[in-house]
Amino acid sequence: MIVEPLDGYREVLVEDNHKSHTYAKVLAHLAEQIYPTAKCITLIEDNLSAHKLAALYEIFPPERARNIIERLHVVRTPAHGSWLNIAGCELSVLKRQGIAQRVATKEELQKQVQAWYQQRNQKESKVDWQFTTRQARIKLKRLYPSL
């Protein structure tokens, strides 16, 4: 799930697994296809073990991997706070709005997912995230350091 909350854009890539090499391919898609001219891409993600930038070096030439990594500013949600990740919230919306209960094939899943995100993009459905840092420090005080 790729989400640009303020622009109302999202894209969902249906892959066979959630391993580090798949993650690296998604990062390459993000940097080279979606935002090829961006100097800095802020990437907010949870702490999934597959989220390893080093995987880029495992599947791409070093120059290409370095180019992608240098343009990324990675922000990770706190442990046990992955619900703060907007992409995770969008996946929940996708599950409720866009996917039939059971999908027989990967191709059918891709069709349903693509139809959902194209409709959301056409409506420019933005994410109105109103959870402030101050609120997070109150609600999640055991996850944030004292300042």
Image: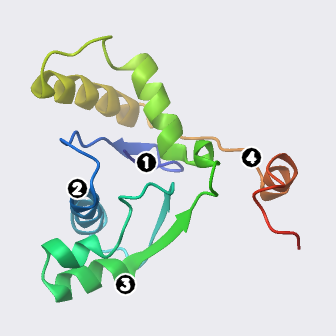
Q: Determine which of the numbered discs, if any, sits on residue 24 in the image.
A: none
- Residue drawn at 73 percent across, 44 percent down: 130
Q: Determine which of the numbered discs, if any, sits on residue 3 in the image.
A: 1
- Residue drawn at 32 percent across, 10 percent down: 101
* Front-most of residues 79 and 129: 79
Q: Determine which residue is flagged by label 2.
A: 22
Q: Determine which residue is flagged by label 3.
A: 70
At which x and y percent is residue 98? 35, 20
Tally of marks? 4
Pointer 3 or 2: first along the chain: 2
Distance of label 1 from label 3 (alpha carbons)? 20 Å
Vertical position of residue 59 compared to residue 79: above or below = below
The amino acid type found where label 3 is placed reads Glu
- Foreground mark, 2 or 1, reads 2
Pointer 2 or 1: first along the chain: 1
Q: Residues within 10 Å of mark 2 (few under 14, many from 20)?
A: some
Distance of label 3 from label 4 (alpha carbons)? 29 Å
Pointer 1 or 3: first along the chain: 1
* Front-most of residues 112 and 124: 112
Distance of label 1 from label 4 (alpha carbons)? 17 Å
Q: Determine which of the numbered discs, if any, sits on residue 131 in the image.
A: 4
Q: Is residue 24 left or right of residue 119?
A: left
Quadrant of residue 145 within the rendered picture: bottom right
Q: Residues within 10 Å of mark 3 (few under 14, many from 20)?
A: few
Q: Residues within 10 Å of mark 4 (few under 14, many from 20)?
A: few
At which x and y percent is residue 142? 81, 55
